[in-house]
Image (tube, grey):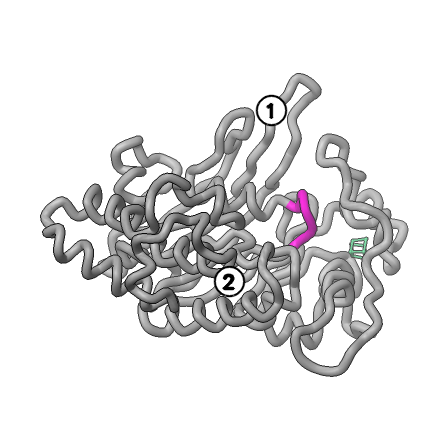
């Protein structure tokens, strides 16, 4: 059962020089309790998409079309894009929480981490006693691997990994159904990164929330995701189970991403990277936006926009994409 349904969502950045199409016609489902990885290079639209879903976009960004529906377990649903200010306040934290890349920027530097959890509980659970809130803050911190006595610590007194864990604890405060994690481990070293990935999976097993996990590092997503969506130039170009994407990618861009990052497990491999740079979103190449960088491009790729037909948006093999990823 889906908890989020995104349909034909488009986001533009409106500037004097014309609209920048940051997200174009994206349709994605997030299933209850799954970890959906969202990958792509910088500028592929993944963070803009997440911010649109969480209603965190600020001008000049604007949603120009599409819908986002949130479905509760009791069968009721919410049109996220139509929520008023007050409803949105209740929706965020309680139903959907966001963990950003830099916890140092996301956390309040002049408030202890315990006080920041307390703030969320005090505002959203007005009937909760002070003692219960303190207990809940201690429990949440312990659950993410921070000892309860550190609740009196300020963000600058914690390591980068601890700050990220504290940000996750705050996101968990009201047991949301969906957590969007935007590059939550990017600034951390590999060992801490892996610890936090394991922690997120364990928390998901315990609490049952669904996660949209955003990163440019596809090998990292293989570690944590159930399903993966690949974005390029504002569009989803491939979706699939993490194993299928790993073993038999069908979009040449997915294959390029897989060859661009060292794997966390397995033998060393030569990294090949993707030739060229991501396109300028103000003037995308006609046809498939990836064609100037694609080693498999055919004549029609520069004029025909491939639709996300099934799980891949590529004209190869009659729209089925790569059949052999060698
Ligand atoms: Fe490459 Fe053509 Fe497929 Fe685009 S549609 S990824 S250019 S083969």
Q: Which residues are magenta?
A: 40-44
Callout 1: 10 Å neighbours few (<14), some, many (20+)?
some
Q: Is residue 12 visible?
A: yes
Ligand 1: give its quadrant: bottom right
Q: Are marks 2 and 1 in contact (CB under 8 Å)?
A: no
Q: Mark 1: is the Cβ under 8 angstroms from ligand 1?
A: no
| Residue at image coords 56%, 45% | 47
Residue position for label 1: 14
Looking at this view, name the residue that lies furthest to the top. Answer: 16
Q: Hey, which quadrant is residue 230 in on the image?
A: bottom right
Is the residue at mark 2 in contact range of ligand 1, meaning its CB lies under 8 Å from it?
no
Residue marked by disc 2:
36
* Image position of 74 (left or right of 296): left
Q: x%, y% of residue 195?
A: 51, 71
In the foreground, 282 or 204: 204
Where's residue 110, x and y in %? Answer: 37, 39
Residue 71 picture location, percent across and down: 32, 54
Res. 318 visible in picture: no
Q: Residue at x 53, y 68 (%)?
A: 225
Quadrant where the N terminus is found in the figure: bottom left
Q: CA distance from mark 2 to mark 1?
A: 29 Å
Secondary structure of the residue carrying numbered label 1: strand
Q: In the rendered picture of this protein, how many numbered marks are placed on residues?
A: 2
Front position in the image: 170 or 5:
170
């Amino acid at each position: 059962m889906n908890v989020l349904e995104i349909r034909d969502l488009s986001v533009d950045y409106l500037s004097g020089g014309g609209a920048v199409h940051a997200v174009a016609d994206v349709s994605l489902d997030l299933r209850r309790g799954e970890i959906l990885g969202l990958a792509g290079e910088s500028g592929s639209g993944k963070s803009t998409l997440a911010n649109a879903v969480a209603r965190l976009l600020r001008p000049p960004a604007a949603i120009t079309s599409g819908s986002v529906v949130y479905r509760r377990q009791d069968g009721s649903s919410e049109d996220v894009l139509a929520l008023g200010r007050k409803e949105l306040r209740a929706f965020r934290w309680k139903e959907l929480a966001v963990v950003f890349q830099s916890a140092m920027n996301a956390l309040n530097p002049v408030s202890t981490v315990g006080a920041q959890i307390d703030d969320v509980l005090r505002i959203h659970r007005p009937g909760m006693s002070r003692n219960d809130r303190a207990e809940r803050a201690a429990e949440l911190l312990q659950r993410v691997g921070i000892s309860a006595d550190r609740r009196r610590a300020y963000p600058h007194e914690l390591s980068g990994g601890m700050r990220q864990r504290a940000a996750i604890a705050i996101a968990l405060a009201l047991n949301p159904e969906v957590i969007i994690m935007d590059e939550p481990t990017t600034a951390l070293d590999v060992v801490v990164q892996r610890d936090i990935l394991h922690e997120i999976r364990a928390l998901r097993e315990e609490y049952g929330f669904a996660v949209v996990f955003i990163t440019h590092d596809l090998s990292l997503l293989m570690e944590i995701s159930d399903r993966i969506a690949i974005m390029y130039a504002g569009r989803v170009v491939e979706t699939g189970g993490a194993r299928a994407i790993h073993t038999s990618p069908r979009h040449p861009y997915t294959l390029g991403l897989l060859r661009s990052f060292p794997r966390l497990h397995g033998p060393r491999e030569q990294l090949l990277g993707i030739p060229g740079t991501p396109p300028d979103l103000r003037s995308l190449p006609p046809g498939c936006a990836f064609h100037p960088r694609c080693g498999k491009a055919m004549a029609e790729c520069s004029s025909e926009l491939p639709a996300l037909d099934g799980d891949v948006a590529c004209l190869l093999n009659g729209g089925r994409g790569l059949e052999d990823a060698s």
